[in-house]
Amino acid sequence: MKAYTSKAVAAWLDISERRVRQLRDEKVITEIRPGLYDLKTVNHQYINYLRKNNPDSESTINYNAERAKLVRAKREAQELELKLRRNEVHTTEDVEQVMTDTLVRFKTRLMAIPAKLSPILSKKKDQTEIFKLLKSAIDEVLEELSDFQTVFGYGVEDEETHS
């Protein structure tokens, strides 16, 4: 059997010579004679040391902790599913659809204001009256936009069943 110095062992294990001495002092690796090591034995001892101290290794997985995580994840998934059924939360797709519909409806209503009011406004001379008509039409459109029940398609009777 060939004996190697701590310098050779350090190079082989890709660690410093000081770390080799620390591992020797911690009784992780063994010398065959003072300052000399069997490379094959030291290599196996070091690998076993790393396996034992690696928190991600298969042997250190705590079954109970993993089971608790799984049970917690299943419970959270069931709670979310229940909230979806009760309409306490909404899916991303539902929210996107509602927002798209709302903004399209809002744009359509805004674009309709000139066509709706131009015949009336063309006959008006009083700026205050023109302002009131425009403001009234814009407020009507904004009111529809701010109405939560209309936006999400809930009627008053539907809202009572969701409470």
Image: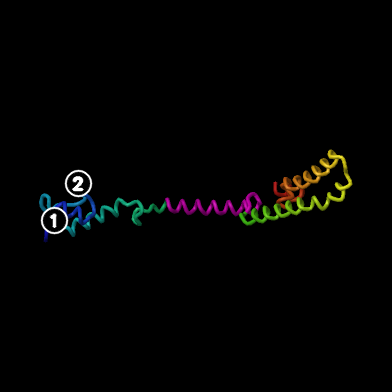
The residue that label 2 is drawn on is 18
137 with respect to 94 (left or right): right
Which residue is rendered at x = 64% and y = 49% of the image?
88
70 inside magenta stretch:
yes
**Residue 74 screen position, x and y as percent:** 52, 54
The residue that label 1 is drawn on is 4
> Real-space Cα distance between discs 2 and 1?
15 Å
Q: Residue 134 carries which label?
A: none
Which residue is rendered at x = 85% and y = 40% of the image?
129
126 with respect to 53 (left or right): right
Task: Determine whether 136 is above or below 48 in the image.
Answer: above
Of the residues shown, which amino acid type is indicated by label 2? Arg
Which residue is rendered at x = 40% and y = 54% of the image?
63
Compare residues 140 and 33 and report the one nearer the observer.
140
Compare residues 12 and 110 and report the one nearer the observer.
110
In the image, the segment drawn in magenta is: 65-90
Report the residue that reaches farthest toward the bottom. 1
